Amino acid sequence: MNNDHKFSPESLMMSYGYKPALSEGAIKSPIFLTSTFVFKNAEEGKAFFELAYGLREKGKNEELGLIYSRINNPDLEILENRLTLWDEAEECAVFESGMSAITTVLLEFLKPGDLLLYSTPLYGGTDHFIHHFLSKIGVNTLAFKPGQEQDELKSILEASGMADKLAMIYIETPANPTNAVIDISACKAIAEKYSTSEKKVLIAVDNTYMGPLWQQPLKLGADFSLYSATKYIGGHSDVIAGACCGSFEVIKRVKTLRTFLGNMASPHTGWLLMRSLETLKIRMEQQAFNAAKVAEFLNKHPKIEKVYYLGNIPKGTREYEVFQKQYSSAGAMLSFDVRGGEKEAFTFINSLKLIKLAVSLGGTESLVEHPYTMTHAGVDPHHKQEMSVTEKMVRLSTGVENYRDIIWDIEQALEKV
Ligand SMILES: *Cc1c(COP(=O)(O)O)cnc(C)c1O
């Protein structure tokens, strides 16, 4: 019998980080709807604040006491502890949205004059923040495309004349909506090359599409694993939230800025996400299983021109190598081109009976959307063509329904085209 058995994350999602004795024996964490916490005495209040403001080092086994819900709250702390398990991270910070997690990291670790290198296409909100806010405060930005990170990235960087200013590489992989993969370790090699003794070039990965189950960026050398917890982690399309996992060192800075921006999640959001985490693995696995069945069906359908799905990457290619190294599943997101154009794609979408038309992804229900006119409406048409986002493309987030029903729905809708 092995006495130091290590539990899997899915086995710890119901209990980790929560002590029933501190809450009248309640099996589940209550929602701590409180703005402030009572100190036992003045000495305790002083000690808590000394830690909160970094006025002294943490004592051995000492934890930051509860002070005020903008700084900490039991629902957020337990949730953060549970989220570290999937990424094998030292620390985690949860936010009121994915965008607040992303923007807080960018604001804390970039300053005017720095260079941010980022992969394209990026989530629309992130792209907007980079171009309309970071550029305004004097942060330089430089884009690269999937595939370029393997050998062209260095020349792109050198050609910009700003290589010495490189502060962060920001990656979104696989790319939305084409599922193009970006090699995180290749980016890590670039980050190391341009790091100096005074400045470490950081790597941030938006892990919303494949995490936390199927991709662990920190293990591949990234410094931040970022989430829109609105997607798989929340998983029921009923909450907006975000998270950031990383080392003690970086998350301490992230949490400090969060305290002053005030963009932490609410106790109720924390509680909802804890409830969601209990079924995270079975939901995601069922979604990936269903997506594989749907892809198999679409691959053979005469009205479908092309299927963009990680499970379709041809063996023996460089992309396949990255896929193998980086992912433990082909995921549950796929896009496909309906033969024709906007008219055909719209007829298909409008004929669906079970699958809903909405943006967002990763929830229990299957959703379709039309990237060209919806999520990617703001991207310039030339750039859209370049990355194969055309009028005929439909994106599907596969849910947990019976896959036969999903396929039936797609089949009958394609018949109307
Ligand atoms: C949805 C999403 C975001 C933004 O998250 P919110 O929770 O909506 O703020 C960021 N990145 C990706 C990849 C997303 O899908």
Image (tube, rainbow, N blue to C red):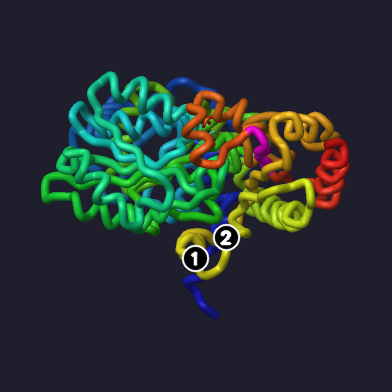
Residue 203 in picture, x, y percent from top left: 32, 46
Q: Main secondary structure of the magenta part?
A: strand
- Regarding mark 2 in the picture, which secondary structure is present there? loop
Q: Is residue 277 above or below residue 35?
A: below
Q: Is residue 332 above or below residue 265?
A: below
Residue 396 drawn in magenta: yes
Task: Name the residue type under label 1.
Answer: Thr
15 on left or right of 286: left
Residue 184 drawn in magenta: no
Label 1 Cα neighbours within 10 Å, binned few <14 / some 14-19 / many ≥20: few
Q: Residue at x 66, y 50 (%)?
A: 307
- Regarding mark 1 in the picture, which secondary structure is present there? loop
Q: Residue at x 51, y 70 (%)?
A: 316
Task: Name the residue type under label 2.
Answer: Ile
Q: Please tell me which residue lies in front, 403 or 34.
A: 403
Q: Please tell me which residue lies in front, 74 or 326.
A: 326
Residue 327 in sight: yes
Q: In the rendered image, which residue does mark 2 sit on?
A: 313
Magenta span = 391-397
Residue 151 in picture, x, y percent from top left: 31, 57
Q: In the rendered image, which residue does mark 1 sit on?
A: 317
Q: Is residue 154 above or below residue 239?
A: below
- Picture quadrant of residue 295: bottom right
Q: Which label belongs to residue 290? A: none
Q: Residue at x 54, y 56 (%)?
A: 214
Q: Mark 2 and mark 1 in contact (Cβ < 8 Å)?
A: yes
411 on left or right of 1: right
Q: Residue furthest left?
A: 197
Mark 2 CB within 8 Å of ligand 1: no
